[in-house]
Amino acid sequence: MTTRHGGCHCGAVRYHAHVPEPLRAGRCNCSICAMKGVAMVHIAQADLTIEQGADALACYQFNTRVAEHWFCTNCGIHIYHRPRSNPTIYTLNAATLDGVRVYEDFPEIRVNDGVHHMKDHGGKARLAGTLRFEPAADD
């Protein structure tokens, strides 16, 4: 585990988190994750500390209202969420970690099948596929 710092786009929200190294991120194809397009890093709830801007954070919930999606009310950037599949953890938006370059650092990333959520389909997590990023060749 390593302590890393991060924050939103406008700088209103800053945090530090204890994250596993090497960083491993995943994505999900459920309705909200597909729209956000976020690469997520799983951490224990106790491993996230909001250092600044807690008052700038807002929570969005829908459907079962188990998942909590926290974002900056100034710039709109999704910081973290508490997933429905495991409400005892948080998933950090990897792009909000200082120094992380999501495309370069995660050129291949697994996508969980949130369309067929495990809580609605017998408790079995399924993989929807894998996303790959191939940088363009310099001309």
Image (cartoon, rainbow, N blue to C red):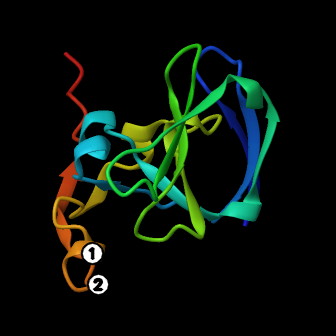
The residue lying toward the viewer, choosing from 14 and 89, is: 89
Query: Does the residue at mark 2 contact the one at mark 1 (Cβ under 8 Å)?
Result: yes
Q: Residue at x 24, y 52 (%)?
A: 30
Q: Where is residue 13 in the image (x, y as percent from the top left)?
A: 71, 26
Left or right: where does residue 80 sit relative to residue 32?
A: right
**Earlier along the polypeptide chain: callout 2 or callout 1?**
1
Q: Can residue 36 be seen in this view?
A: yes
Residue most toward the front?
A: 64
In three-dimensional space, the C-alpha distance between marks 2 and 1, rounded to whole angstroms, equals 4 Å
Q: Where is residue 95 in the image (x, y as percent from the top left)?
A: 50, 36
Q: In which quarter of the image is the C terminus?
A: top left
- Identify the disc placed on residue 91: none
Left or right: where does residue 139 sit relative to residue 102?
A: left
Q: Residues within 10 Å of mark 1 (few under 14, many from 20)?
A: some
The residue lying toward the viewer, choosing from 4 and 88, is: 88
Q: Which residue is drawn at 38% across and 41% down?
A: 38
Q: In which quarter of the image is the N terminus?
A: bottom right
| Circle 2: residue type | Gly
Q: Quadrant of residue 58?
A: top right
Left or right: where does residue 124 sit relative to residue 26?
A: left
Q: In which quarter of the image is residue 51?
A: top right
Query: What secondary structure is found at the residue carrying circle 2?
Result: loop
Which residue is under mark 1?
118
Which residue is under mark 2?
123
Q: Which residue is drawn at 54% across and 15% down?
A: 75
Q: Is residue 22 visible?
A: no
